[in-house]
Image (cartoon, rainbow, N blue to C red):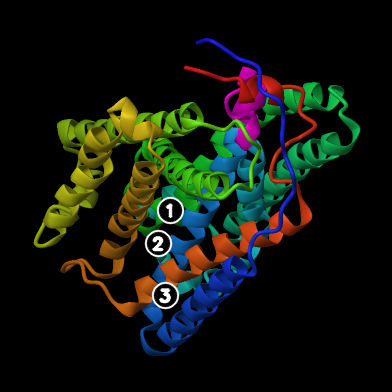
Amino acid sequence: MSSTTHAIHYEKKHLPASAGTLGWGVLIAGLAVAGASFAMDPMRAKYSSIMLFMFLAGVGICSLFMVSIEYLAGAVWSTPLRRVFEILASSLLFLPLFALPILPFMQELYLWTHKTDDILARKAAYLNQPFFLIRLALILGIWILFYKLFTGRSYKQDETRDQDLTRKNVKLSAVFIPVFGISITALSIDFLMSLEPHWFSTMFGVNFFAGSLVAALGVITITVILLNENGYLVKGIIGDHYYSLGFGMFAGCVFWTYTAFSQGMLIWYANLPEETPWFLNRWEGSWKVITIALLLVHFIGPLFGLIQRKNKRNPSRMIFMAAWVIFAHVLDLYWIVVPVFQPEGPSLRLTEFGFIAIAIGFLIVLVTQQAKKKNLVAVGDPKLQRGLAFRL
């Protein structure tokens, strides 16, 4: 890697009003469809609420994970982009709202809340409703606290240029990483794996993390490229920065494949009756098509789409591949959740598109609203100059 010197040219600009209008329009349309779905197909809408919550939770906390990794590793390539990570991490503030449509219907969604047998009795110390709610409150509260601490110092640094704030965030990152690992695993077990409470897997949490990280990098990539190509970020962000985001998506997809394969292979090899039915249910009938499609979409597509260096430096191709890996994660969530209530085979209805519209509209509104209040670049960070001089 070599470096050159760049002057920092950042001028805060307001995003066009049309961006906010688009976001609100998509969000309201999605809410309307979701409302109609709760009236006409309530069970499907309730399970779709779980997918929406877990998608936004994964994107939000993995965006904050990217912030912490930059501080902990002393990375410079991401410093000019970090404010976008922080803005997307602000979705953590709204997660309690997205959890609300799920909590009143836990008796319908989660078998362990109202039935018991020998297996569930042994898990009852963990799988009980009061402890579930306590864990949820603790996880969301801790995530929001870390978000406030990280971003509060980052935003303050724009004004004070105090390098000690960076050192404090480095120390905070060392605390955050293990807390992050435990909490994202617990959330994935609670909301996703416990949908079929007889089944268990020690790889499930890390597999959900891998998929969420890829999706978060996809959302970050689209946001960064659209902002930068339209002149809203700092001058000096080039293809090498895009390359790093592309490499992150590529590595994340490979890591997801490794964890997914390891989980499936170990369960297949052990052939235990309490583990295999979960996979067998997704290998029967037309669910087999989705299982094969998931492998192609989540691994083969990104492998060929992102392995070439030129693709990772090309803005339009990067946006396409970012949208691709986001879709891959959505398909993964669909594959995990929908067989629980529709074991006979997959189908697409307007309900799913409504909840997807909510996620898209919410993220657009989040970025446009945050951009009105904050700089889109961490102008006070001492690593910004080196970040702009970053070259591969």
Left or right side of 44 for 152:
right
Rendered position, 80 above or below 117: above
Q: Which residues are magenta?
A: 67-81
The answer to which quarter of the image holds residue 175 is top right
User: Which residue carries the number 1 mark?
Assistant: 121
Classed neighbour count for the residue bearing mark 1: other residues with Cα under 10 Å, few (<14), some (14–19), many (≥20): few
Q: Is residue 189 magenta?
A: no
Proximity of marks 2 and 3: CB atoms separated by less than 8 Å: no
Rendered position, 237 above or below 185: above
- Depth order, front residue of 282/20: 20
User: Which residue carries the number 2 mark?
Assistant: 116
Q: Position of residue 96 (x, y in %)?
A: 64, 62
CA gap, disc 2 and disc 3: 34 Å
Q: Position of residue 52 (x, y in %)?
A: 47, 63
Q: Position of residue 112 (x, y in %)?
A: 43, 61
Proximity of marks 2 and 1: CB atoms separated by less than 8 Å: yes
User: Which residue carries the number 3 mark?
Assistant: 354
Residue sitting at x 47%, y 55%: 55
Q: Amino acid at mark 2?
A: Thr
